[in-house]
Image: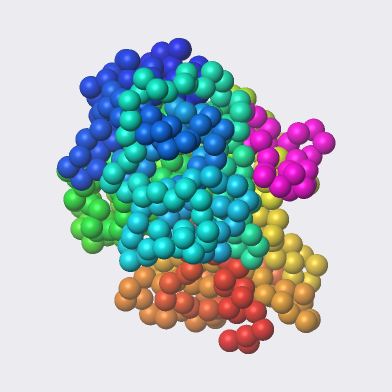
């Protein structure tokens, strides 16, 4: 068994984790990207040199530094350099453009802004200039460098706010979520202890490193001393060569990632798409039970899914040794120290992994109840054995003729239909009923186009109550998704189909 030294798991800051792991296993790899390898020892040494370079530029403890960078070894080095300095860092998803980036820069009052230059056809440096950003510097493949002897002592505590993450704005501006090193370590520790990795595992970071999952995953690598492959741009089947080359054993990201791996597996049934893969894991979006069963059945790997959000990076996580029923139908159990309270169906949270609130004090006041529990806006219940079951979102409940209908319940049933690759169920305004139930479906290649009567008959056969049956069906080429964990953007579907009789 790969035990975590107590001194490592109780580290007060992220930099303490780096320093202690580098002392334990300096020559073991931590990050792999194409043909490049970064060891734990090099992570500490190079991050300190980058920190010294940043210090020479004027970055000090408490300085706000925003960065909008892709998933690269250099990005991790820059982030840990900022953690070494005790700066306040504000990661911005690299796909965001003027509205979201300008808002993040203004609200965080960033004094420096690291960009990749021209990346995937977009000139980030030009955008930064257009937005009037301060202290703009490029950090794609060349990072600031200096002599670490000039550095002040590392941060002594991990309870100060040193991270500003951004919720993905939909119809309103994003929220700046305030985190500490301790809250990020708590979230990553939950992930690590739930997945039970060993030093022989090889993970993968296929999502934007600027997502809250970035430090979450790095904490797991630091605690257990194993490496992960980084993907600057994730797409299948192109990424499969690196998965195979590095012998990835643990992969995933979210439900959309599971489906992408499944699609590749179905192109070569009987031969494992990644021979070394033993576990898919992720969170951030609902997981229909049929997806779990299909992954286990067709890919011959285990799947564990969890529940997290920008405000609380890891709330619950499935245990690889749990029962198939629990892994298929629940989000797992919370770690020690995470309190879950259900109030009128809503999930509320209190614990060390919970954020400190938002940049806007009014948003903070509205988000926490009088007992200090964060209102998540998610609906759910806790089973007798302590597993959390998600049943939908407060804003995702369709109210038809006064009856509440869970969109997730219908989506889970649709996921098992052979002519459905993915589905989103939304409520649309209706004068007579208040809202009508609309199923928006993405179909697999070669499938015959679905018709509403066929869909309704299928759902009735699956036992769905008559009052929950969709009254409208829309078949789309692709559901709109965000660029982080590929969540379906239902607000775009509502905008598209509201007021449209089809």
In the image, 78 versus 186, the foreground residue is: 78
Q: Quadrant of the N terminus?
A: top left
Percent x, y for residue 224? 36, 24
Residue at (57%, 42%) from the top-left corner? 164
Q: Is residue 134 left or right of residue 36?
A: right
Q: Is residue 173 left or right of residue 479?
A: right
Residue 356 magenta-drawn?
Answer: yes
- Extent of the magenta region: 346-373
Percent x, y for residue 391? 63, 51
Percent x, y for residue 501? 63, 87
Q: How is the image coloured?
A: rainbow
- Which residue of the protein is positioned furthest toward the right in this rendering? 370
- Which residue of the protein is positioned furthest toward the bottom in this rendering? 501
Q: Quadrant of residue 169?
A: bottom right
Question: Is residue 22 at least partly visible in the picture?
Answer: yes
Residue 456 magenta-drawn?
Answer: no
Question: Is residue 313 at least partly visible in the picture?
Answer: no
In the image, 228 versus 315, the foreground residue is: 228
């Amino acid at each position: 068994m790969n035990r975590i030294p107590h001194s490592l798991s109780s580290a007060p800051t992220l930099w303490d984790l780096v320093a202690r792991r580098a002392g334990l296993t300096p020559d073991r790899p931590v990050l792999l990207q194409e043909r490049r390898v970064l060891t734990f020892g090099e992570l500490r040494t190079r991050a300190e040199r980058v920190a010294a370079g940043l210090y020479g530029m004027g970055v000090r403890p408490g300085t706000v530094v925003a960065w909008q960078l892709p998933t690269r070894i250099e990005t991790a080095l820059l982030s840990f350099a900022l953690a070494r300095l005790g700066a306040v860092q504000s990661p911005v998803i690299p796909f965001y453009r003027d509205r979201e980036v300008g808002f993040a820069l203004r609200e965080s009052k960033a004094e420096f802004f690291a960009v990749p230059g021209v990346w995937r056809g977009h000139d980030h440096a030009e955008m930064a200039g257009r937005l009037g950003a301060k202290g703009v510097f490029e950090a794609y493949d060349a990072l600031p460098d200096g002599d670490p002897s000039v550095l002040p002592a590392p941060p002594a505590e991990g309870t100060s706010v040193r991270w500003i993450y951004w919720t993905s704005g939909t119809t309103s501006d994003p929220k700046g979520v305030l985190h500490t090193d301790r809250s990020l370590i708590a979230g990553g520790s939950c992930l690590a202890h739930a997945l039970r990795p060993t030093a022989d595992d090889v993970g993968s970071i296929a999502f934007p490193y600027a997502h809250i999952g970035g430090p979450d995953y790095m904490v797991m690598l630091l605690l257990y001393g194993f490496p992960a492959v980084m993907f600057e741009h994730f797409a299948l089947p192109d990424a499969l060569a690196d998965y195979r080359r590095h012998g990835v054993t643990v992969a995933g990201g979210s439900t959309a990632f599971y489906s992408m791996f499944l699609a590749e597996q179905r192109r070569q049934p009987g031969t494992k798409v990644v021979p070394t893969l033993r576990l898919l894991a992720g969170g951030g979006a609902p997981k229909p039970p049929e997806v779990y069963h299909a992954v286990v059945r067709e890919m011959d790997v285990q799947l564990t899914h969890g529940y997290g959000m920008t405000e609380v990076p890891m709330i619950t996580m499935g245990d690889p040794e749990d029962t198939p029923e629990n892994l298929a139908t629940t989000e797992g159990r919370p770690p020690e120290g995470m309190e879950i309270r259900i109030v009128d169906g809503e999930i509320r949270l209190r614990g060390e992994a919970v954020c400190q609130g938002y940049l806007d004090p009014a948003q903070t006041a509205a988000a926490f109840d009088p007992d200090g529990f964060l209102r998540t806006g998610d609906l759910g219940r806790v089973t007798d054995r302590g597993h959390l079951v998600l049943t939908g979102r407060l804003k995702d409940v369709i109210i038809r003729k006064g009856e509440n209908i869970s969109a997730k319940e219908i989506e889970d049933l649709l996921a098992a239909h052979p002519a459905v690759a993915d589905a989103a169920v939304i409520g649309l305004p209706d004068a007579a009923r208040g809202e009508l139930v609309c199923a928006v479906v993405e179909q697999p290649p070669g499938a015959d186009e679905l018709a509403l009567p066929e869909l309704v008959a299928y759902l009735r056969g699956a036992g769905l109550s008559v009052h929950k049956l969709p009254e409208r069906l829309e078949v789309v080429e692709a559901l709109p998704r965000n660029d982080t964990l590929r969540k379906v953007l239902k607000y775009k579907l509502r905008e598209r189909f509201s007021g449209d009789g089809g």
